[in-house]
Image: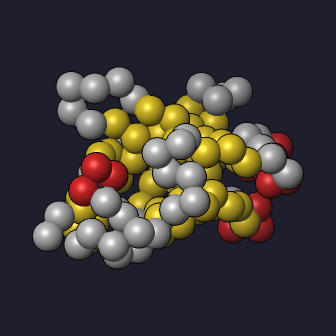
């Protein structure tokens, strides 16, 4: 059972990135998936919640209106579309299946000019 994130990178302010989180070893469609981020020395922050079947989403105020979480259960993937990126979005991004207690290894996003 694992989650694998990808899609991070170095971008300029105002750019977009799409992160992916692929689930393996479990029935992906049955589980809520969340995205978190963490800056060194700070607590991990939940930024987006997506229920199974995609019927419910919620976002942290810091990303609301700029980030969009979605899922494609056929591909066992949850996406985090990040638009209008800011330097303060720089962090390691993780996906999580809370009821399984499973975390991915993270993907680094750096926003800098």
Q: State the residue at coordinates (14%, 70%).
A: 113
Please tell me which residue lies in front, 50 or 7. Answer: 50
Q: At which x and y percent is residue 85?
A: 36, 64
Q: Residue furthest left?
A: 113
Q: At which x and y percent is residue 29?
A: 80, 51
Quadrant of image for the N terminus: top right
- Where residue 7 sits, quadrant-wise, is bottom left
Q: Is residue 76 left or right of residue 51?
A: left
Residue 17 seen by the camera: no
Please tell me which residue lies in front, 2 or 9. Answer: 9
Q: At which x and y percent is residue 69?
A: 63, 57
- Where residue 41 sits, quadrant-wise, is top left
Please count the marks in the image.
0
- From this view, report whether residue 64 is shown above or below residue 11: above
Q: State the residue at coordinates (27%, 69%).
A: 13
The chosen color scheme is secondary structure
- Where residue 42 sits, quadrant-wise, is top left
Q: State the residue at coordinates (80%, 47%).
A: 56
Q: State the residue at coordinates (33%, 73%).
A: 14
Residue 87 seen by the camera: yes
- From this view, report whether residue 31 is shown above or below residue 63: above
Q: At which x and y percent is residue 51?
A: 77, 44
Q: Is residue 58 left or right of residue 90?
A: right
């Amino acid at each position: 059972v694992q989650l694998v994130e990808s899609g991070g990178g170095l971008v300029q302010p105002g750019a977009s990135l799409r992160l992916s989180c692929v689930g393996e070893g479990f029935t992906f469609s049955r589980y809520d998936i969340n995205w978190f981020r963490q800056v060194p020395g700070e607590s991990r922050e939940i930024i987006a919640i997506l229920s199974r079947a995609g019927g419910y989403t919620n976002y942290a105020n810091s990303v609301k209106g700029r980030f969009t979480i979605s899922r494609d259960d056929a591909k066992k993937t949850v996406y985090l579309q990040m638009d209008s990126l800011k330097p303060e979005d720089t962090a390691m991004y993780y996906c999580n299946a809370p009821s399984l207690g499973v975390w991915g290894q993270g993907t680094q996003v750096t926003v800098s000019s």
